[in-house]
């Protein structure tokens, strides 16, 4: 069976088309990443997707869904993470993905996202020899932390500490080097979020 997955992230929207291998491990057919950054405004008190970000995001989903169909995908799965789940108008993005791109989009909770990252890591042949390890997945809107024991997820957490979110909150001039005061504010915020 050939399956396609579209991952709608805060910074990029990705496609993976894969066949099921003889051992049940996915075998990549093709992949593609479109840098869209739909998450502008994610750090506001009431996050929402801006019209231009939403339009670009839907266009990217349509493009990648068409790529998947050309590659002969039997099934297309689409998921959205922090930018869409945190946005007040995330449901509108969901509905437009279905109507405009013909894709049923699942908006993942933070814990769903963390656990699916864990599932993906345990199928990675490059990590097959590891039985106990920890990992961080830093996105634009959120940071997921996972700890594995005997190749099973023993702890998972998702926190609103993505790089776009923190940049919007604390960095005055993103094109310039981070100054000490901004770095300190980010450090305090990250510590407070993790502790609480």
Image: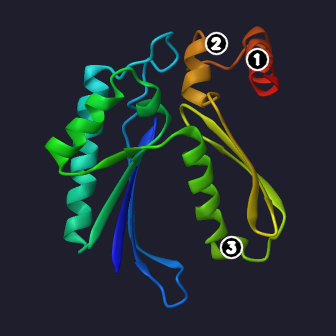
> What is the CA distance from the residue labelled 3 to the residue labelled 2?
36 Å
Residue 177 vertical placement versus 1 (above, below): above
- Report whether residue 171 is seen: no
Task: Determine which residue is flagged by label 3.
Answer: 126
x and y, in percent, of residue 7 in the image? 42, 50
Residue 139 vertical placement versus 152 (above, below): above
Q: Quadrant of the N terminus?
A: bottom left
x and y, in percent, of residue 128 in the image? 72, 76
Q: Decide if residue 4 is on the left or right side of residue 162.
A: left
Q: Mark 3: few, some, or many residues within 10 Å (few <14, many ≥20)?
A: few
Task: Determine which residue is flagged by label 1.
Answer: 183
Q: Looking at the rendering, which quadrant does residue 139 occupy?
A: top right
Between marks 3 and 1 in the image, the one whose residue lies nearer the viewer: 3
| Pointers 3 and 2 in contact (C-beta within 8 Å) | no
Q: Residue at x 25, y 21 (%)?
A: 51
Residue 179 vertical placement versus 144 (above, below): above
Q: Mark 1: few, some, or many residues within 10 Å (few <14, many ≥20)?
A: few
Q: Residue at x 51, y 9 (%)?
A: 45
User: Which sits in the foreground, 11 or 160?
Assistant: 160
Instruction: Give whichever of discs 3 and 1 has the lower sequence position.
Output: 3
Q: Residue at x 42, y 22 (%)?
A: 40
Q: Decide if residue 93 is on the left or right side of residue 147.
A: left
x and y, in percent, of residue 49 in the image? 35, 23
Task: Determine which residue is flagged by label 2.
Answer: 170
Q: Quadrant of the C terminus?
A: top right
Residue 33 vertical placement versus 74 (above, below): above
Q: Element under label 2?
A: helix
- Report whether residue 12 is seen: yes
Q: Residue at x 46, y 37 (%)?
A: 11
User: Which sits in the foreground, 64 or 145?
Assistant: 145
């Amino acid at each position: 069976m050939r399956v396609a997955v579209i991952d709608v992230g805060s910074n990029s929207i990705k496609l993976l088309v894969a066949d099921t291998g003889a051992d049940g491990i996915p075998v990549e057919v093709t992949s593609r990443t479109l840098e869209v950054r739909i998450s502008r405004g994610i750090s506001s008190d009431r996050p929402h997707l801006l019209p231009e970000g939403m339009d670009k995001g839907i266009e990217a989903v349509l493009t990648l869904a068409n790529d998947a169909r050309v590659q002969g995908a039997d099934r297309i799965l689409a998921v959205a993470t922090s930018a869409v789940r945190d946005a007040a108008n995330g449901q509108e993005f969901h509905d437009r993905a279905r109507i405009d791109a013909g894709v049923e989009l699942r908006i993942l909770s933070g814990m769903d996202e963390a656990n699916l990252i864990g599932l993906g890591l345990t199928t990675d042949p490059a990590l097959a020899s590891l039985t106990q390890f920890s990992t961080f997945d830093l996105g634009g809107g959120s940071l997921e932390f996972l700890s594995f024991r005997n190749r099973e997820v023993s702890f998972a957490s998702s926190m609103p500490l993505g790089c776009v979110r923190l940049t919007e909150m604390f960095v005055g001039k993103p094109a310039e080097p981070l100054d000490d005061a901004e770095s300190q504010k980010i450090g305090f915020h990250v510590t407070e979020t993790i502790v609480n």
